[in-house]
Image: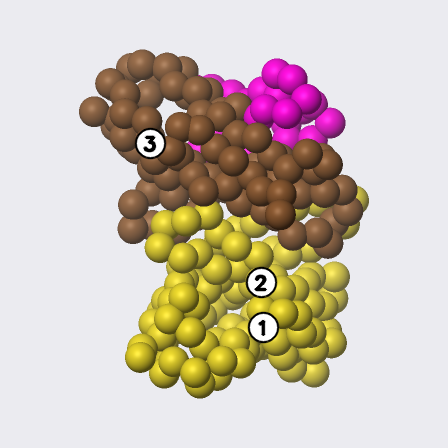
Chain colours: A brown, B yellow
Amino acid sequence: EPEVTQTPSHQVTQMGQEVILRCVPISNHLYFYWYRQILGQKVEFLVSFYNNEISEKSEIFDDQFSVERPDGSNFTLKIRSTKLEDSAMYFCASKVAGGLNEQFFGPGTRLTVL
Amino acid sequence: DAKTTQPTSMDCAEGRAANLPCNHSTISGNEYVYWYRQIHSQGPQYIIHGLKNNETNEMASLIITEDRKSSTLILPHATLRDTAVYYCIVRVVGSSNTGKLIFGQGTTLQVKP
């Protein structure tokens, strides 16, 4: 069964460093998402991406964040200068075209900022 | 998207049906009810969705009241692997909608042997 994959599973970085989180969505999916979950808190929407552009972003997704689909398979989230409060699980999700279709989530990347 | 209210936690005996309620009293006519679950910090997993009719799939059943102000997710024979946080999400579906999901705190279901 096709699945969303994410790498790395765990990333440790120093405050102020740039990180890139990688996702490979399911191949025929057209909508892509990033969510994050700070330990013990709820899952929060960050950004949605469709047709090679951001379709919606939350207040969390400020100028430090960017997303890219550099080729036909990868979908990346870049944090330019990490802060301690960026420590969280980051989940990528994708879905096919059509409003009713469910989102498929990856296993997540745990980001730890020291 | 309409706000949902769920109990913080519930217990269920293994092999019994788990009935998870959700209130969405401000739901509008074009909003669907979706259920996802998250097993121990894994990525959320889609379970089922519905508009106004009851729905069933291989994982669960969804019962939506006639006035659509509340719904119940039913896991017919809960197993220990069903221990998870269950999220009820109400969202508009349409071409102008990006499909983002807004998660609440959900219900932590503990299935006990």
Percent across and percent down for residue A15 are 25, 19
Q: Which residue lies at the image location 37% right of the left edge and 71% below the top edge?
A: B80
Q: CA distance from mark 1 to mark 2?
A: 7 Å
Is A89 placed above or below A78 here? Answer: below
The subunit carrying tag 3 is A
Residue B47 visible (yes or no): yes
* Mark 1 Cα-neighbour bin, 10 Å: few <14, some 14–19, many ≥20: some
CB atoms at circles 1 and 2 under 8 Å apart?
Answer: yes
Q: Are marks 1 and 2 in one subunit?
A: yes
Q: The C terminus of chain B appears in which quarter of the rendering?
A: bottom left
Q: Say which residue label 3 marks.
A: A10
CB atoms at circles 2 and 3 under 8 Å apart?
Answer: no
Q: Which residue lies at the image location 38% right of the left edge and 19% below the top edge?
A: A19
Look at the numbered disc 3 and give the secondary structure of its residue. Answer: strand
Percent across and percent down for residue A83 are 29, 24
Q: Quadrant of residue B32?
A: bottom right
**Amino acid at circle 1:** Ala
